[in-house]
Image: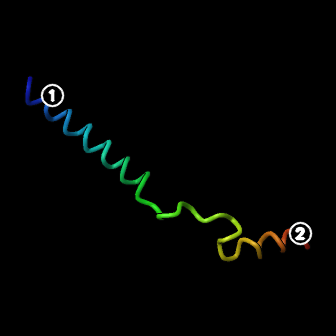
Amino acid sequence: MRWILLEAFGALALLVLIVWWTMFSGRKNGELSDRAQPGASDKASQADHD
């Protein structure tokens, strides 16, 4: 019984670690805004002209 609980705790800890890693290991200053992304202004200006 202890082994099953230990294994379940280990799996939960691994899941939390993976979720934390994927959520907070991005860019240091956060995501780029739409204006800072290359090509975003070109698409917006093309939509205005159509």
**Residue at the front extreme of this rendering:** 29
Question: Which secondary structure lies at badge 1?
Answer: helix
In this rendering, the answer to whether 20 lies above or below 41 is above
Few, some or many residues within 10 Å of mark 2 (<14, 14–19, 20+) = few
Q: Quadrant of the N terminus?
A: top left
Q: Is residue 28 left or right of residue 48?
A: left
Q: Residue at x 76, y 73 (%)?
A: 41
Q: Is residue 23 left or right of residue 38?
A: left
Q: 29 and 11: which one is in front?
A: 29
Residue holding disc 1 = 5
Q: How far across and how far down the image is residue 27, in percent? A: 48, 64
Distance between mark 2 and mark 1 Cα atoms? 60 Å
Q: Earlier in the sequence, mark 2 or mark 1?
A: 1
The kind of residue tagged 1 is Leu
In this rendering, the answer to whether 27 lies above or below 19 is below
Q: Residue at x 15, y 28 (%)?
A: 5
Q: 29 and 7: which one is in front?
A: 29
Question: Which secondary structure lies at badge 2?
Answer: helix
Q: How far across and how far down the image is residue 50, in percent? A: 91, 71
Residue holding disc 2 = 48
Q: How far across and how far down the image is residue 17, in percent? A: 30, 47
